[in-house]
Image (spheres, rainbow, N blue to C red):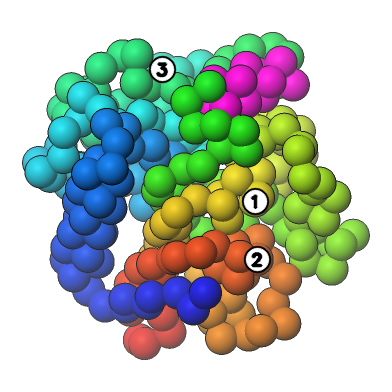
């Protein structure tokens, strides 16, 4: 479905993010006492997560997962969990039993992926259905830790080989963005979410976003995600939108 696109100043993007999050939470929680979200790391987390604690959301019923995690301990400065914890989970007082972090510190990443997959399926079903996924975008068009691959003409190798019934969480051992070892949800899981918010800031992201939004031939992970997601909101600052 065609994404809803909002491009402009950061304060406008923050306002749209906050109102979209609140509306989605209200709609889902009017049907059932559970709102299942997946969070990214990076600049999108830094820009948007501080807004969350003051939203009108019943945080005691929000189940928190991650779209990806770096293979570091949960206290490490590179940990996506640590960032979300500081900016959102602690200030919003999310109950510990609703926080489902990926265990990137485990020496066996495949085991960490299986553990994360089991926890996701136990809460969100099989195949998992997220109510909201929040992702950033890399210059190369990656989302979460799904990176494009030359071998497959742009589509990530993992995406090209995805099959129905595959595990929803993958171990990544060769990420071009450091750290090289990561855990990620698959594109199928992200694209199956009821709503996907894609956000990007800065001129270095402009080409990837232009291709994903306007270029029907683009095969990057972000283009695939926007093509497949049932509903999506794209938030771009002026530079990422190519407006300045
Ligand atoms: C991560 C992310 C990753 C990120 C993009 C964009 O763990 O690094 O979840 O997918 O969102 O790389 O990162 P920036 O917004 O910081 O450029």
Please report whichever mark, 1 or 2, sits nearer to the chain's N-terminal start.
1
Question: How many residues crowd mark 3 within 10 Å: few (<14), some (14–19), many (20+)?
Answer: few
Could you tell me which residue is drawn at 36 percent across and 29 percent down?
63
Against 148, residue 103 (above or below) is: above
SS label for mark 2: helix
From the image, which quarter does the C terminus lie in? bottom left
| Camera-side mark, 3 or 1 | 1
Name the spot of residue 205 as percent of width and height, x first.
51, 69
Is residue 111 inside the magenta stretch? yes
Label 1: how many residues lie within 10 Å, few (<14), some (14-19) or many (20+)?
many
Picture quadrant where residue 32 is located:
top left
Q: Nearer the viewer, residue 73 or 96?
A: 96
Answer left or right for 76 relative to 15.
right
**Main SS type for the magenta part?**
helix
Residue 144 disc label = none
Identify the residue at horizontal 60%, vertical 45% (top origin): 189
Above-or-below relation of 58 to 50 = above
Q: Are marks 1 and 2 in contact (CB under 8 Å)?
A: yes
Which is nearer the N-term, disc 3 or disc 1? 3
Q: Which residues are magenta?
A: 110-121
Question: On the image, numbered disc 2 is attached to which residue?
Answer: 224
Q: Is residue 223 visible?
A: yes
Residue under numbered circle 3: 75
Q: Secondary structure at mark 3?
A: loop
> Dot 2, crowdedness within 10 Å: few (<14), some or many (≥20)?
many
Q: Which residue is mark 1?
A: 187
Q: Mark 2 or mark 3, which is nearer the start of the sequence?
A: 3
Q: Can you say whether 142 is above or below 208 in the image? A: above
């Amino acid at each position: 479905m065609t994404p809803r696109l909002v491009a402009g100043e950061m304060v406008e993007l923050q306002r749209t993010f906050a109102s979209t999050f609140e509306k989605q939470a209200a709609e889902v929680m009017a049907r059932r006492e559970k709102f299942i979200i997946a969070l990214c790391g990076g600049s999108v987390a830094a820009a948007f997560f501080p807004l969350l604690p003051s939203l009108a959301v019943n945080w005691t019923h929000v189940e928190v997962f991650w779209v990806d995690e770096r293979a570091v301990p949960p206290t490490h400065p590179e940990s996506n969990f640590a960032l979300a914890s500081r900016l959102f989970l602690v200030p919003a007082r999310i109950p510990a039993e609703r926080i489902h972090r990926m265990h990137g510190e485990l020496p066996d990443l495949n085991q960490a992926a299986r553990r994360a997959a089991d926890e996701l399926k136990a809460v969100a079903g099989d195949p998992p259905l997220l109510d909201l996924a929040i992702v950033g975008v890399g210059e190369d068009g990656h989302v979460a830790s799904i990176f494009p691959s030359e071998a497959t003409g742009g589509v990530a190798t993992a995406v090209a080989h995805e099959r129905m019934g595959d595990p929803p969480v993958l171990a990544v051992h060769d990420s071009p963005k450091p750290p090289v070892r990561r855990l990620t949800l698959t594109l199928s899981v992200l694209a199956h979410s009821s709503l996907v918010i894609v956000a990007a800031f800065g001129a270095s992201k402009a080409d990837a976003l232009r291709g994903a939004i306007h270029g029907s031939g683009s095969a990057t992970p972000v283009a695939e995600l926007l093509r497949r997601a049932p509903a999506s909101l794209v938030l771009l600052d002026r530079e990422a939108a190519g407006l300045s």
